[in-house]
Image: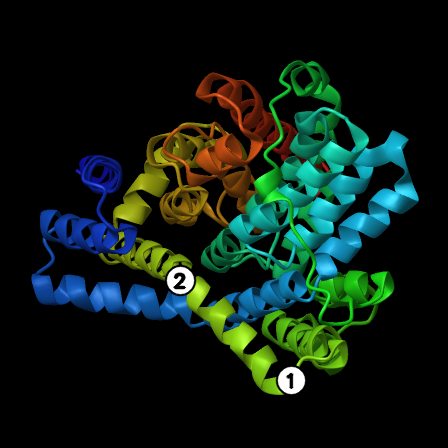
Amino acid sequence: MAFFSILFGILLLLFLVTILKLDTFISFMLVCLSVGLIEGLTISESINAIQKGIGSTMGSLVIILGFGAMLGKLVAESGAANQITNSLVSKFGLKNIQLALIVTGFIVGIPMFYTVGFVILVPLVIAIAAKTKLPLLYIGLPMLASLSVTHGFLPPHPAPTAIAEMYGADLGLTLLYGIIVGIPAILSAKFLLGKTMKRIQPELLKEYVVETDTNYKIPSLTVCLVIALLPVILIGGASALKIVIINNPVLEAIGNPAIAMLLAVLVAIYFLGVKTGRKTKDVMKILSTAVSSIAVVLLIIAGAGAFKQIMIETNISDRIGDTLGSLGMSPILLAWLIAALIRVAVGSATVAGLTAASIMMPMVGTAGVSAELLVLATGAGSITLSHVNDGGFWLFKEYFNVSIKDTLLSWTLMETTVSVVGLIGILILNLFI
């Protein structure tokens, strides 16, 4: 009965989101109520479970995601993203242009949501391609692979952060492990897709070239890099130091994601806002716009949290966990596979990752596998096989001016390559942790 309930819930979610085109949050609410009723909960009990799930999931995430959106918007609006890109391209030279943009995508992708990073960086890629006469995909695909890794693997991005919370994983270790497995995954797009990147040569769309606002000062490269990477420096650095310095309250505070993001935003407000010539009230308007832009993401995460709680209240999670545990399949492979299947069906990496995490929760801590690696495996599965039901697929198609066929042969292939190589890296890392 448990498998029938969860299968019905997932199929209903797919039907509502993909066929009826209903809002994802509303779809999650309908699915939660339906599964609750099938499993014997009353309407009131189902509503209570939904409220509890939303509260427990969002309570620890709103601060991180809100500050993350603010930081990303300031990096974009201040010209810091352009500064990072242009400076790295200049320093790396034409020969290493791919590497320069990989580094740029990684640095800019950490504080930004995927769509924001895409819209900011891809026009710069188009401008560089126009200037250097190099194939657009040769320059762009490795950079997008870098963005995908930060989106699927690394906190403080919404899905990895939420999944880490659900699994009880340490965010600092998740970040460190994610960087370790993410670097080979990114480089795989550069080395394994070389022929594809040179074969497909679309006409450049000049209207997407970004113009930098010259009314304000542009921060130095050092300032831009430090601020963009500050959450990683604080969270990852504190986690690394805690191995040597135990029970240090200062490290505990700095390594707390909420405190790290708050500090990063405060620094960005001054160095990327006030010091560039903007008035404080104008900087605050930028932050307000940033917060409103993540409302949809927050609701999707809230819906997934409600679904998780329904599964807990009805004991579906425990029953599925017992059954899956008896299959003998590696939890890492299982987490990746479930997320990949949902990703193919739904299109949203966030929905795929969080729904898979809801199913995998009972196995966390019982299968002898690091919770942090399970976060990465779930995230890796959630970005595989992007196709026509994924917004990123169409963003790529339109910005890069390619056909649906060539989008499948480039974008979809890149996403899948990054996902599979990431999974291999996670399995190898599991041998040593």
User: The N terminus is located in which quarter?
Assistant: top left
Q: Nearer the viewer, residue 231 or 3?
A: 231
**Which residue does the image show at 47% across and 27% down from the upper left?**
385
Residue 73 picture location, percent across and down: 59, 65
| Res. 293 mark | none
Question: On the image, numbered disc 2 is attached to which residue?
Answer: 298
Above/below status of 14 relative to 407:
below
Q: Farthest residue in the bottom direction?
A: 280
Q: Quadrant of residue 137?
A: top right
Q: Is residue 255 left or right of residue 54?
A: right
Is disc 1 surrounded by few (<14), some (14 to 19) or many (20+) residues within 10 Å? Answer: few
User: The C terminus is located in which quarter?
Assistant: top right
Mark 2 in CB contact with mark 1 (< 8 angstroms): no
Q: Quadrant of residue 215?
A: bottom right
Please give the count of numbered marks on the rendered protein: 2
Q: Of callouts 2 and 1, which one flags the residue occurring earlier in the amino acid sequence?
A: 1
Query: Element at badge 1?
Result: loop
**Which residue does the image show at 69% across and 53% down from the upper left?**
108
Residue 151 picture location, percent across and down: 57, 47
**Distance Cα–Cα, label 2 vs label 1:** 29 Å
Q: Quadrant of residue 234?
A: bottom right
Q: Is residue 41 left or right of residue 433?
A: left
Amino acid beneath label 1: Lys
Q: Nearer the viewer, mark 2 or mark 1?
A: 1
